[in-house]
Image (cartoon, rainbow, N blue to C red):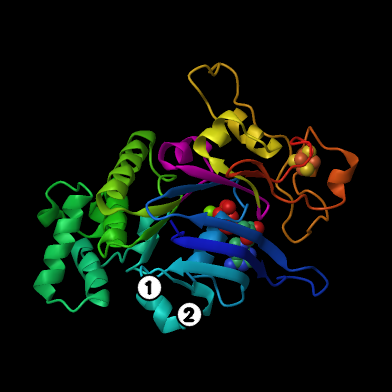
Amino acid sequence: MPPLLDVRHLTVEFPASDSASSQPLAAVRDLSLTIAPREVLGLVGESGSGKSVTSLALMRLLPPQARIAGELLFANGKGSSRDLLQLPDEGMRTLRGSQMAMIFQEPMTALNPVMRVGEQIAEAVAVHAQVTKKEAWDRAVAVMEDVAIPDAALRARDYPYQLSGGMRQRVMIAMAVVNRPALLIADEPTTALDVTVQAQILQLLAELRSKFGLAMLFISHDLAVVSQVADRIAVMYAGNLVELGSKHDIFHAPAHPYTRGLLNAVPTLKTDRTRPLATIEGTVPAMNVVPPGCPFEPRCDFRVAECACRLPPLLEVSPGHWARCPVVNQV
Ligand SMILES: Nc1ncnc2c1ncn2[C@@H]1O[C@H](COP(=O)(O)OP(=O)(O)O)[C@@H](O)[C@H]1O
Ligand code: SF4
Ligand SMILES: [Mg+2]
């Protein structure tokens, strides 16, 4: 089946903000990945690794100073695809909220505080369809029921501040799926929520996926959270894709030292809770100093002299399982 989204060589740079001599900040470097229809791809990496910049590039929501290169091929449902980076602004506005939609960590920043939540969802309907006010409102209430908001017709009249954090995130999800997009981009959608509510939202996303046939790019810094929803997992480090594979590959045969470090930091039932969790020594490198070699080299227990000389290529270590480390994978 051809992919729904085919990202080819995506690179995003921001011009240097301070002295004229410093290099641009390379937030995403030559990133290629695909998402199949109805597939959930998890994107994981420490804070600052380029996950949000990737998602905003896909939605064409980066600030104008961002320099974007590559291709973002999105299927048009008729057997061919178009490059989102080449679409005129008008075409992109039509696509956003209808065929692709996004939810964020903090729904309060995306919701209008002085507008009833039902009206906000109804407005999202009316932007993309010729409907009466009553039809738009009814669709808003129906989608609030789809996302399991109790007493949806009543809650639709609430303002965002009247709802709990979990209910606000459900409203955001309702607004994102009301026009039945093919792709939902979820950027840390549960990070601001407590553990119980987080589990409920993950469950809801899984239900919506099968009910509406949604594909998802699910982003989190937390590998344990990603593993609850994703079919395949992409691992980013310092703007680079360092590993990509099925959930089974990532958890049972991790092929990049950084992924192994992330896995060690995931608590399991066997974790000794009296001891602090393992973390990876060191910090993510500054993104405006692009080292010539492997970006993980300063923190890597497996490094050899060549690691600092050139960026390793992504190698297919088993069918569909790629890793950017020739040392651990001995070629
Ligand atoms: N608008 C911007 N201008 C300049 N730099 C930015 C901007 N947005 C993000 N960055 C930088 O890009 C890098 C990646 O950020 P981000 O994608 O937000 O990371 P993540 O979501 O993985 O935590 C960071 O170094 C961040 O400071
Ligand atoms: S290429 Fe070298 S430094 Fe990079 S992850 Fe592999 S062993 Fe470590
Ligand atoms: Mg982010």
Tell me: residue 145, above or below residue 8. above
Q: Quadrant of the N terminus?
A: bottom left
Q: Position of residue 230 (x, y in %)?
A: 44, 42
- The residue wearing badge 2 is 87
**Left or right of residue 275, residue 199 in this image:** left
Q: Position of residue 307 (x, y in %)?
A: 84, 44
Q: Position of residue 232 (x, y in %)?
A: 50, 43
Q: Say which amino acid is labelled 1.
A: Leu
Which residue lies at the image location 68% right of the left edge and 39% below the top edge?
Answer: 258
Range covered by the magenta-colored residues: 218-240
Q: CA distance from mark 2 to mark 1?
A: 10 Å
Is 329 or 15 nearer to us in this picture? 329
Decide: marks 2, 1 in contact (CB < 8 A)?
A: yes
Query: N-terminal of the two: label 2 or label 1?
Result: 2
Q: Say which amino acid is labelled 2.
A: Leu
Q: Position of residue 44 (x, y in %)?
A: 55, 45
- The residue wearing badge 1 is 95
Q: Where does ligand 1 appear, by image quarter?
A: bottom right
User: Magenta stretch: residue 227 in it?
Assistant: yes
